Image: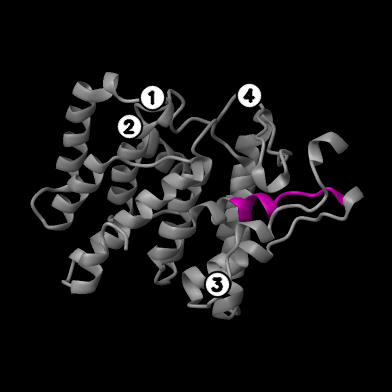
Amino acid sequence: MSSFDEYKKLGEPGKAEKAAIWETAIGLQQVDGLTPSSYLIETAKDHIDGYITIAEVKERLENYYKIHSKRIDTEERTEEADKVSARITEILSENTFILSPAEYLTIHKRLFSGIYKFAGKIRDYNISKDEWVLKGDTVYYASADSIKAALDYDFAAEKAFDYSKLTKEETVKHIVKFISDIWQIHPFGEGNTRASAVFAIKYLRRFGFNVNNDLFANNSWYFRNALVRANYDLVEYGIHATMEYLNRFFGNLVLKQNNTLKNREMQVRIGTVKTKL
């Protein structure tokens, strides 16, 4: 049982929704292997119960870490997990959204301000990341010089796209491909997946979709691995980029499907890829 199941079972108006958003926010920390503190959980419960506002949650965390930061193992990045969870909760509680690169960058800035010096800023260096699902290999991300142009292109194409003749299933698949494409650009030094997830949830809501928060709460690592597999090719060994796993995830998230989500099914099958390149 999760920390917030009691609220969902009681079904009190407002409390169940707040609890679901908190579960999503906390679950999303798993994409970077982070775990929020018990202090954050108890503070979140005070917010769900209506004793404090989300602004007061954030204030409590700031005060808490002014006192306790030196006593906490910084390698565990608990402070980051706590603060980002609260900020995700705040953003997902707002009925605001605009389809633009500025929105994407602003979400990142709001999530990571005071945590990363480059919060909300496009990276000016090239990156690679060792991926478990690729046996240590990396996705090819956009070069630093091309990030702005790539974002502008993808957002302009998405804005111009006509959804009017698509079924609900086709609409979701197209949105998922767009999210995958902007994630592959990887415009930020860190925090790309969490920012992309928040952006995706808000974009889906703009279409009127009811997002199943439990999926991000319980399967956020699957979400990240599925993004990796959607943007990785190694043709020499018969490995091709595939949207299959992302479509499974979003099928459950939005379309109430019951697809099996197993991380091991996504892992490449050719031994240690890095040694073969």
The amino acid type of the residue labelled 4 equals Tyr
Percent of width and height locating residue 146: 68, 34
The Cα atoms of the two marked residues, 2 and 1, are separated by 8 Å
The Cα atoms of the two marked residues, 3 and 2, are separated by 33 Å
The mark nearer the N terminus, 1 or 4, is 1
The mark nearer the N terminus, 2 or 1, is 1
Instruction: Give the extent of the magenta segment.
Output: 225-235
Residue pictured at 31% horizontal, 39% vertical:
82
Q: How crowded is mark 4: few (under 14 residues within 10 Å), some or many (20 or more)?
A: few
The amino acid type of the residue labelled 2 equals Glu
Q: Where residue 74 is drawn, which disc sits there?
A: 1
Mark 3 in CB contact with mark 4 (< 8 angstroms): no
Percent of width and height locating residue 80: 36, 33
The mark nearer the N terminus, 3 or 2, is 2
Q: Which of 255 and 32 is in front in this view?
A: 32
The mark nearer the N terminus, 1 or 3, is 1
- When the figure is inspected, residue 98 is found, relative to residue 37, above or below; the finding is below
Residue identifier under label 4: 125
Percent of width and height locating residue 96: 33, 55
Q: What element carries label 1?
A: helix
The mark nearer the N terminus, 3 or 4, is 4
Q: Of discs 3 and 2, which sits in the foreground? A: 2
Residue identifier under label 3: 251
